[in-house]
């Protein structure tokens, strides 16, 4: 059988990578993420995929491919379909962003999922701190049991949660999946643990970049991977191209320098927003907090993330920051006369540990001494600023990607109206961000250095632009096999 690749996402869009590699009976998926652009065509906050419909909505809206032996029996049966024997050997995950890993929750738990240690840790953080994901664990769906009283009840997460078959690899060390030899390499991205792969097949080597950049804190990781990719003399390079038309990159050092300038001039509360699990950006603002003599305040999810990486070289450590006692549910934490035993009931079980930590800070403390803090506030938490009441002289610094579509522009307009109400003047709002993706100049250099026989661009809205870089470019179409020759 010839070696083939079938693309079920990432074609003419940013994200949604799902690539099926077949070689001599071995079947491996490269990533299994959400197609955001396809998803947004049909869904928004007011209408979501119907969980009770099993997998039918996903098939109807072409969000996941109809492939035998891939999906969970409990979901198939509930969807009116027959259970299927496993027919996929493995899934290789490049990193834990939703557009690369989100739909693992639909996949059979016995299919091995290969990823880096850091990716595994972050997927566990998702599973522990949200109720939507099943990256590393599987919760039986649509299952009943008989109670001691003889009545019927539904099986819960607490009763039958099971571990998914996660295989954590070591970087630079090859491993076999059937007829394919896989070597993973660490690359720099906006999420730690990002991986690129070199796959040795019976018809030549395939290089898969996942998402990467050359302008973050660890460009040498990406450069090392590129050197190894060149040495492998690949038949095919599958490369991301998110920013293929851009020529420059704002670096993480640029973010630190410019943000420092804004925060050092701030006379009151410095409110910051950045991707919650971007450990490089957390380090950036931690360094700024030390240089500007402020106390960095994180939320519960970031506290959980830092705790997860306590035994690694990741900085800061949890003890080095303050944890915001964010009000939830009945807001009892903000009421001094509330029964103490009732306060924890406002929070999920995983949050209660951080609520009791010694290094917490309350709404009243931040409100009273605003100039002392560098306060993380995501878009979902803007309401808390109504209680903190930022004083005149406070700033808002956004360190997430700038809006690039109509929906994101509407979100920005909504946020600006919030900041108007909060009294943070427009001239006190700043946009400072470093992308997780390589620019076009760096991608051109990478492609030229690797010298693959063929190049397939994915994770980009401008695949045709690659023809200007190399005549070896070929374009994948959704669901069509590409034979490696």
Image (spheres, helix red, strand yellow):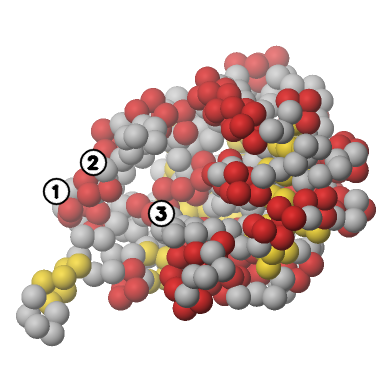
Mark 1 and mark 2: Cα distance apart in space: 9 Å
Residue 380 can be seen, yes or no = yes
Q: Callout 3: 10 Å neighbours few (<14), some, many (20+)?
A: few
The residue identified by callout 2 is: 56
SS at circle 2? helix
Among the two numbered marks 2 and 3 on one chain, the one whose residue lies closer to the N terminus: 2
Q: On the rendered image, what quadrant is the C terminus found in?
A: top right
Residue 399 is left or right of residue 455, and the answer is right
Among the two numbered marks 1 and 2 on one chain, the one whose residue lies closer to the N terminus: 2
Instruction: Tell me which residue sits at (56%, 62%) in the image.
Output: 334
Residue 231 is left or right of residue 157, and the answer is right
The residue identified by callout 3 is: 132
Query: 28 or 139, which is in the foreground?
Result: 139
Q: Callout 2: 10 Å neighbours few (<14), some, many (20+)?
A: some
Query: 461 or 414, which is in the foreground?
Result: 414
Circles 1 and 2 in contact, beta carbons < 8 Å = yes
The residue identified by callout 1 is: 80
Instruction: Tell me which residue sits at (47%, 78%) in the image.
Output: 341
Among the two numbered marks 3 and 1 on one chain, the one whose residue lies closer to the N terminus: 1
């Amino acid at each position: 059988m010839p070696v083939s690749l079938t693309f079920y996402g990432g074609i003419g869009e940013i994200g949604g990578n799902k690539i099926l590699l077949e070689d001599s009976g071995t079947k491996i998926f490269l990533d299994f993420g959400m197609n955001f652009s396809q998803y947004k065509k049909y869904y928004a906050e007011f209408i979501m995929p119907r969980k009770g419909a099993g997998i039918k909505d996903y098939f109807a809206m072409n969000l996941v491919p109809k492939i035998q032996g891939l999906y969970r029996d409990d979901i198939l049966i509930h969807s009116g379909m027959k259970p299927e024997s496993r027919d996929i050997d493995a899934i290789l995950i490049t990193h834990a962003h939703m557009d690369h890993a989100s739909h693992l929750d639909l996949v059979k738990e016995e299919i091995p999922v290969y990823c880096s240690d850091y990716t595994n840790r972050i997927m566990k953080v998702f599973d522990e701190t949200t109720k939507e994901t099943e990256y590393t664990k599987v919760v039986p769906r649509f299952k009943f049991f008989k109670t001691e009283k003889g009545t019927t009840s539904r099986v819960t997460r607490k009763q039958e949660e099971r571990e998914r078959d996660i295989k954590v690899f070591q970087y630079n060390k090859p491993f076999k999946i059937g007829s394919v030899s896989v070597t993973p390499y660490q690359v720099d991205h906006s999420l730690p643990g990002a991986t690129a792969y070199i796959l040795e097949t019976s018809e030549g080597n395939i290089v898969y970049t996942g998402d990467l950049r050359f302008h973050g804190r660890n460009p040498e990781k990406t450069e090392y991977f590129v050197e190894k990719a060149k040495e492998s003399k690949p038949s095919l390079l599958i490369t991301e191209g998110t920013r293929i038309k851009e020529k420059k990159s704002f670096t993480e050092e640029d973010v630190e320098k410019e943000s420092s300038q804004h925060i050092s001039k701030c006379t009151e509360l410095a409110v910051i927003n950045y991707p919650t699990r971007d450990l490089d950006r957390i380090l950036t603002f931690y360094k700024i907090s030390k240089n500007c003599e402020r106390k960095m305040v994180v939320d519960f999810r970031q506290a959980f993330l830092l705790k997860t990486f306590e035994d690694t070289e990741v900085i800061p450590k949890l003890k080095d920051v303050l944890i915001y006692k964010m009000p939830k549910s009945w807001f009892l934490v903000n009421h001094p006369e509330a029964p103490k035993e009732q306060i924890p009931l406002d929070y999920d079980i995983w949050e209660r540990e951080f609520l009791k930590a010694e290094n917490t800070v309350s709404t009243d403390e931040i409100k009273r001494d605003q100039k002392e803090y560098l306060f993380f506030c995501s878009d979902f938490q803007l309401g808390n600023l109504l209680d903190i009441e930022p004083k005149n002289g406070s700033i808002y610094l956004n360190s997430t990607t700038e809006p690039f579509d109509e929906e994101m522009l509407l979100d920005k307009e909504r946020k600006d109206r919030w900041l108007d109400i909060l009294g943070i003047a427009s001239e006190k709002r700043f946009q400072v961000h470093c992308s997780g993706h390589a620019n076009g100049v760096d991608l051109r250099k990478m492609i030229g250095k690797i010298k693959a026989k063929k190049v397939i661009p994915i994770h980009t809205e401008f695949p045709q632009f690659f023809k200007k870089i190399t005549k070896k470019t070929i374009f994948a179409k959704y669901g069509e096999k590409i034979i490696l020759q």
